[in-house]
Image (spheres, rainbow, N blue to C red):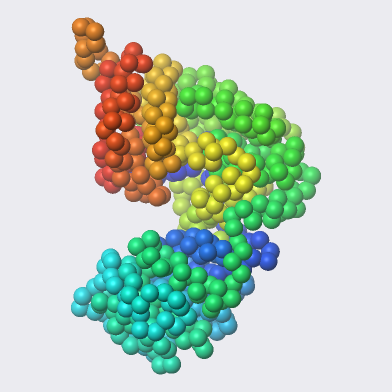
Amino acid sequence: MSTGAAHEAHNVVTEATAATGLADEGAPIGHPAGVDEVVVLDYGGQYSQLIARRVRECGVFSELLPHHVGAEEVARRRPRGLILSGGPASVYEDGAPELDPALLELGIPVLGICYGMQLLARELGGRVESAEVGEYGRSELTVRESGLLFEGLPGEQPCWMSHRDTVFEAPEGFVALAASTQSPVAAFESRERQVYGIQFHPEVVHTPYGQQILTHFLRDACGCEMSWSAASIVDEQIAAIREQVGDGQVICGLSGGVDSSVAALLVHRAIGDQLTCVFVDHGLMRKNEGEQVVKTFRDEFSVPLVAVDAEDRFLEKLAGVTEPEEKRKIIGGEFIRVFEEEASRLSGAQYLVQGTLYSDVIESGGGTGASTIKSHHNVGGLPDDLEFELVEPLRSLFKDEVRAVGAELGLPERLVWRQPFPGPGLAIRIVGGEATKERLDLLRDADAVLQDEIRQAGLYRELWQSFCVLPDIRTVGVQGDERTYGYVVVIRAVTSDDAMTADWARLPYDLLERIASRMINELREVNRVVLDITSKPPGTIEWE
Ligand code: XMP
C-alpha cells in the first residue's frame, strides 16, 4: 500500500479539480455584491475552517486567511468583523503567532476564540497564564452577565474547551461574562472597544449554543445582514463567468463527480453552447456511471459533450501492471493525453473550467499567495502548462455549499450526493493484481450490489465512501455440494469528514448478510465476502 503524495491526492485525474494555477497574489476570492463578509484569521487551530463554515451558515460570507497576512490584506476585503481563531501555541512560546495591533485599529468588531482570546487579553492588558490543569473536552459554562454574546441564553450551558493557557483577568474596562470549571474568565467583552473573547469553541457541535453566540457577534456586534447563501452565488458567478470569457470558447473535463458537474452546469448556465464538456471514459468507472453522466449532461441539460470511449487504450496500457503507483502514473498520463487530443480538436478553446474548491484555495495559500503550494494538488491532474486561462466558479465554496449550488441548479440527487471516487477508479481497487476487463466487470457488479443495498438501507449519504475491493486471490468454498475456488470481495465502508481520518462504518449485521448473500448468489466467480474494520490511521481508505 502506498503512502506517497500521489496517494493523498484527492483530486487526481477524472475529478480534474486540481488547482493547477497558484492562488492569485493576494486577491480576495470575492463574494456576492451587497453581501457582508467577516474574515477569520487562522492561528493554526484544528477548527479554523469550521469557524468560517459556521459563519457562512449564519448567512454571512466568510474567508479564512493565514494569521500573518497583515491588517492591510484584511482591510481589502472590507469585512464587517474579524474573528481570531484558536491555535496550538502558547502565547508565551518563542515564535508563537503574534497579534498585529493594527488589526485592532481597523474600526471593526473583533472576536477572539481560544488562542485568539488569549492574544487579545495579553495585548490589551489582561492576565493570561499557563494553568496547572488544562481544560480539554466538555466543560460547564456559568454566565454571570449575558452581555451581547450571551443575550437570552441560559445561565448554565455546556461548552467545548481545548486549552492550557487561561485568562485569569480580563483587560481593564472589559466585562468578564462567564467562567467555567477551569477558566475564571471564559468570556469577556467591551462593547466600547468592540472587542469580544471566548475561551471555548462555539463552532463545534458540542457547544450547543455556539451558533447563537456567533450570531450575536455577527448580527449585533458587527451589524451584518445575514443574507449570504451558497445559492446566492449562482447569479453572481454567472455574471462573473460571462465577464471573464466574453464570447470565448470554454472546455471542461467532466468526471461525474460533484465538483466538475456543478462547475460545468454553472458555466453552461452562463454561456450556453460556448462550453464543451469532455468526458473521458477510461473504463475504470462504476457500473453504468459513464452512461449516466452522458445522459444527464447531454440529454437532460443539453450541454455540448464529447464522450470519449477510451477503455481499450487504458486497459492496454494497464496490461501486466500490478504496482499501485505505477497504475496511478499510467492512468494519469493517459488521461492527460486523451484530454489534450480532444481539446486540440475543439479549435479555439481558450478557457478551461476547473472545479477548484475553497479548501483547495486555502491549502494553496488562502488566496494570499503566501504559503507553500501543496505539490500533491498537481499529481496526476491536468498539467499547468496547458495553454488555457482557468475558469474556477467554485473557488469561494466549501464542499457542502457546492452541493447546495448543485441542487439549486437542478442537478439530480444522485450526482449532488455522489460519494468521492478516486481518479484512477476501480484500477486501484483490484489489489495486488492486474486490472483486466474481466476483473473490472466483476468488481463493478459486486460494487453495484453494495451500492444498491446501501442506498436501500438509507445509508448512502451517511457514509463518506462505501465500495468493494477485489484482491487478486482465490479461496476455497463449497456450493451445491461442489468445491469452489473463487474470488474474495472486500466491503469497505467508512465515515469521515475530510478523508484525512476515517472510521469503519458499523453497518448493521442483517444488511451485511444481505449484501454477502446477494454477491455470492448473483456473482458466480465470488465465493467469499469479508468486511474491512480498519480505521484511518493506521489504514488508508483505499487499499492501494
Ligand atoms: P486514502 O486511501 O489515502 O484516500 O485514505 C483518501 C481519499 O482520497 C481518495 N484517493 C484518491 N483520489 N486519486 C484520487 O482522485 C487517487 O489516486 C486517490 N487515492 C485515494 C480516496 O478515495 C479517499 O477519498
Q: Is residue 233 left or right of residue 438?
A: right
Q: Work out whether 205 lies above or below 543.
A: below
Front one among 403 and 394: 403
Q: Where is residue 493 drawn, in percent x and y?
A: 34, 37
Q: Quadrant of the N terminus?
A: top left
Residue 518 in view: yes
* Image-based side of 535 in relation to 269, left or right: left
The residue sitting at 34% across, 62% down in the picture is 206
Q: Residue at x 64, y 55 (%)?
A: 233
Looking at the image, the residue that sits furthest to the bottom is 172
Is residue 337 visible in the rendered image? The answer is no
The percent position of residue 329, horizontal first and vertical second, equals: 45, 33
In front of the other: 424 or 81: 81
User: Camera-side residue: 323 or 355?
Assistant: 355
| Location of residue 49 by image quarter | bottom left
**Of the pair 179 and 31, the residue shown nearer to us:** 179
Specify whether 381 is left or right of 268.
left
Question: Is 405 drawn above or below residue 225 in the view shown?
Answer: above
Q: Residue at x 71, y 38 (%)?
A: 275
Q: Is residue 315 above or below residue 50?
A: above
- Total of numbered circles in the picture? 0
Q: In the displayed structure, would residue 236 be above or below residue 433? A: below
